[in-house]
Amino acid sequence: MGKNLYKHIYYCSTQDGCESSQVTEESKMKYEAYHQVYSYTGYELDKLEEKNGTYYTESGENILDLVDSAVESSGKVPKEFKQQMNNWIHDLVSTISTRGWNNVPDMTLSIFIWKERLKGHEPVDYIPV
C-alpha cells in the first residue's frame, strides 16, 4: 500500500497548479531520471559512475547510449516521438549528473496519522455509489 500511496501523492503533487513542499522541481527531475533510465535499461542511476555529465556502467558503457538503443527498440514510444524521448532523458540525466546525484534533494513524504486515520479525514460509514 505504501508504494501506491506514494505514487498517488507524487501524481497529485505534480499536477498543474499544485504547490507541494514534498515534491520540488529538482526532486521530480531526479525521480524521472532514475525511473526512465531504470525502465529502459534496468540500471539504477545512483549505483553508476557519474562523470562528464552522464553515468557509466561498470563495463564503461555510457548509460545514454544504452537508453538510446532501448528507446529505439521499444514499442512503448511511437516512432515519431523516439527522438524527443531520448532528448528528454538525456536532459534529465545530464542535469542530475552535472549537479551531482547527492546534491539534488529526494522527494519527501509526510503523512499525519491521528486517532488511527489520516489527519483531516473524518470516518465515513456510508459512501453512496
Image (spheres, rainbow, N blue to C red):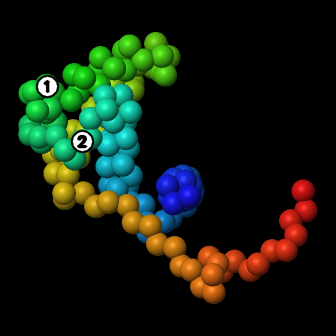
Marks 1 and 2: in contact by CB < 8 Å? no
In three-dimensional space, the C-alpha distance between marks 2 and 1, rounded to whole angstroms, equals 13 Å
112 with respect to 107 (left or right): right
Name the residue rendered at 21%, 29% in the picture. Answer: 63
Q: Is residue 12 above or below residue 69?
A: below
Name the residue rendered at 20%, 51% in the picture. Answer: 101
Q: Which label number is shown at residue 124?
A: none
Element type at mark 2: helix
Name the residue rendered at 36%, 49% in the picture. Answer: 31
Residue type, numbered disc 1: Glu
Q: Which quadrant of the view contains residue 66?
A: top left
Can residue 86 be seen here? The reply is yes
Q: Which label number is shown at residue 61?
A: 1
56 with respect to 30 (left or right): left
Rendered-image quadrant of the N terminus: bottom right
Determine crowd level at label 2: few under 14, some 14-19, many 20+ residues with C-alpha closer than 10 A.
many
Residue annotated with mark 2: 45
Q: In the displayed image of the protein, which residue is found farthest to the bottom?
A: 115
Along the viewing direction, whichever of 10 and 112 lies nearer the viewer: 112
Horizontal and vertical percent position of residue 91? 28, 36
Residue type, numbered disc 2: Leu
65 with respect to 29 (left or right): left
